Image: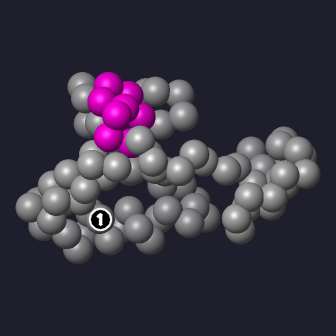
Amino acid sequence: MGAELGDNVIQGAAGPSEFRTAPLWGLGQRIFFFLHDGRATPASGGLLHAIEQHASSGSEANAVISLLNNSLSDEEKQDLLNFLRSL
């Protein structure tokens, strides 16, 4: 995807050929859909599904997703979701 942008915009550590996502501000206001195209809905797993959908070969998200799935208890995952929904 990155090479297709070519918009010469640098935002944080993301250069002009890298995809930049919106900040998490207001995440709690988006109750019904997540991801860039809205495909993560409550019926498909909501916010957890959206987080897990960022996994792919070479993705910086892989380490975080692995920690989420393998290091947090169900209660800790719920605490994380509650925090994200408070934003």
Name the quadrant of the N terminus: top right
* Residue at position x 88%, y 45% in the image: 7
Answer yes or no: is residue 10 visible: yes
Q: Is residue 20 magenta?
A: no
75 sits left or right of 15 in the view: left
* Residue, disc 1: 68
Q: Is residue 49 left or right of residue 4?
A: left
What residue is shown at x 67% (from left), y 50% (from top)? 20
**Whether residue 49 is visible:** no
* 1 versus 80 height, above or below: above
Q: Please identify the quarter of the rendering in which residue 13 is found.
A: bottom right
> Can you give x and y, in whole percent of width and height, for residue 67 in the image?
32, 71
**Looking at the picture, how far across and down is residue 53, in whole percent?**
44, 46
Query: Residue at coordinates 24% horizontally, 70% vertically from top-left?
Result: 70
Which structural element holds mark 1? helix
Q: Amino acid at mark 1?
A: Leu
Q: What main secondary structure does the magenta stretch of the protein show?
A: loop
Eyeballing the image, is 86 above or below 40?
A: below
Asked if 72 appears above or below 48 in the picture, the reply is below
Q: Which residues are magenta?
A: 27-34
Task: Locate residue 8, reporting x and y percent.
Answer: 90, 51
| Left or right position of 74 against 67 | left
